[in-house]
Amino acid sequence: MYTIEFVLKEVRIKHGLTQKQLSKLSHLSQTYISLLENKIKIPDLNAIAKISNGLNIHPMELLKVKKI
């Protein structure tokens, strides 16, 4: 199963955004986005809401897990 970190990176790339661009759209630091994508930090609900707003998607899109 994919983790939220994998899904975050996948969705970000699908939207054609860099970490820096996503950080500006979501009002989170680029460092924090990187830490999330590298599984160093786990996003809280506030971060998930900010990221989903920045990507203009429903928060559940980031929480979907897929079987390999």
Image (cartoon, rainbow, N blue to C red):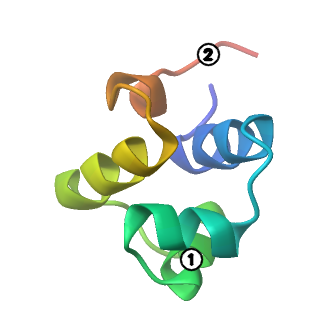
- Describe the element under mark 1 as helix, strand or loop: helix
- Describe the element under mark 2 as helix, strand or loop: loop
Residue 48 has which mark?
none
Residue, x 47% and y 21% (percent of image)?
Answer: 64
Q: Quadrant of residue 17?
A: bottom right
Identify which amino acid the numbered label 1 is placed on: Leu
Disc 2, disc 1: CB below 8 Å?
Answer: no
Lateral position of residue 65 relative to residue 37, left or right: left
* Relative image position of residue 31 (x, y in whole percent): 57, 87
Residue 35 has which mark?
1
* Relative image position of residue 35 (x, y in whole percent): 56, 77
18 relative to 10, above or below = below
- Considering every residue shown, the one lying at the far top of the view is 67
What residue did someone put label 2 on? 66
Q: Earlier in the sequence, mark 2 or mark 1?
A: 1
Identify which amino acid the numbered label 2 is placed on: Lys
Residue, x 72% and y 38% (percent of image)?
Answer: 15
Residue 14 visible in the snapshot: yes
Q: How many marks?
A: 2
44 relative to 10, above or below = below
Please state, as top left, top right, bottom left or bottom right, where the C terminus lies in the image. top right
Lateral position of residue 20 relative to residue 49, left or right: right
19 relative to 47, above or below = below
Residue, x 51% and y 72% (percent of image)?
Answer: 24
Front residue (pair 41, 20): 20
Please state, as top left, top right, bottom left or bottom right, where the N terminus lies in the image. top right
* Relative image position of residue 6 (x, y in whole percent): 66, 44
Residue, x 68% and y 46% (percent of image)?
Answer: 12
